[in-house]
Image: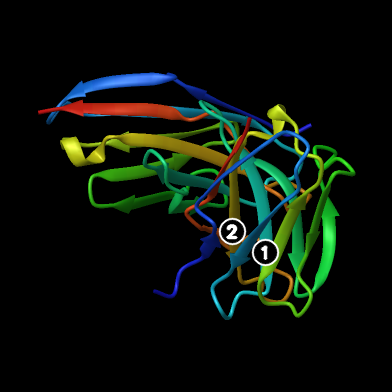
Amino acid sequence: EDQVTQSPEALRLQEGESSSLNCSYTVSGLRGLFWYRQDPGKGPEFLFTLYSAGEEKEKERLKATLTKKESFLHITAPKPEDSATYLCAVRGRSNDMRFGAGTRLTVKP
Amino acid sequence: DTGVSQDPRHKITKRGQNVTFRCDPISEHNRLYWYRQTLGQGPEFLTYFQNEAQLEKSRLLSDRFSAERPKGSFSTLEIQRTEQGDSAMYLCASSLALGGRANNEQFFGPGTRLTVL
């Protein structure tokens, strides 16, 4: 069964303090690893899709990387508006996505 | 606004009542998904449609739950005889699957928060 584990569960950073969020996964036949951002009371907002080991994608202060067993979401010089829950999901042979529980990020000014 | 929309945004009901939620996907998207999310957890897949056909259902989808997408556009999710354990955020997402590539990103709506008293 496909599994996704995200760590840490919660992360508190000072503004400008760079860090990384981890997503470890086991999946049969990876057909995509997805990162989403979710603000309280709202639906997840799509950030990135990664398809194969070694792939990297960037958007503003965020950079996602992928290996055969895990993905990292690197946050460079975060700002308070980056505070949110970051969700990782995988798609294997089925057409649904399996989500992790998320990392709740708080960035203090 | 051309994103995914859901209605209502909030629903409070008494145990045993039936509820129905609606999702309007992004207009050109042929796939529509339903998820359930509880506090502190990621979304859990319930079911998905390609056009009007319901192609996959999770074992989480008990026989009290039914979903339809009659014309391949909007979808409804009905919960019969609601239980307190049904309290959750119900999320809808849509995507455009082109040819054999089914990895296309899913875009989520704002969700319907259900509270069963």
Give the chain of mark 2.
B
Please say if the residues under marks 1 and 2 sit with CB atoms less than 8 Å apart. Answer: yes
Report whether mark 1 lies on the same chain as mark 2.
Answer: yes
Q: Is residue B15 left or right of residue A66?
A: right
Residue A99 sits in quarter? top right
User: In the current view of this chain or complex, which residue is farthest to the left?
Assistant: A109
Q: Amino acid at mark 2?
A: Ala
Q: Quadrant of the N terminus of chain B?
A: bottom left
Question: Between disc 1 and disc 2, whose residue precedes?
Answer: 1
* Residue at position x 47%, y 54% in the image: B110
| Residue in the foreground of this view, choosing between B15 and B106 | B15
Residue A41 located left or right of residue B81: left
Counting other residues with Cα less than 10 Å from the Cα at mark 1, is it few (<14), some (14-19), or many (20 or more)? Answer: many
Chain letter of mark 1 equals: B
Q: Is residue A61 above or below residue B56?
A: above
- Residue occupying the point 38% across, 38% down: A40
The residue positioned 51% from the left and 58% from the top of the image is B109
Q: Is residue B33 above or below residue B100?
A: above
Residue B33 is situated, as x and y percent measured from the top left of the image, at: 67, 57
Q: Quadrant of residue B15?
A: top right
Q: Which mark is residue A29?
A: none
Q: Identify residue for label 1.
A: B32
Q: Is residue A78 visible?
A: no
Type of amino acid under label 1? Leu
Q: Looking at the picture, tell me which residue is in the foreground, B48 or A33.
A: B48
| Residue B103 rendering spot, x and y as whole percentages | 63, 60
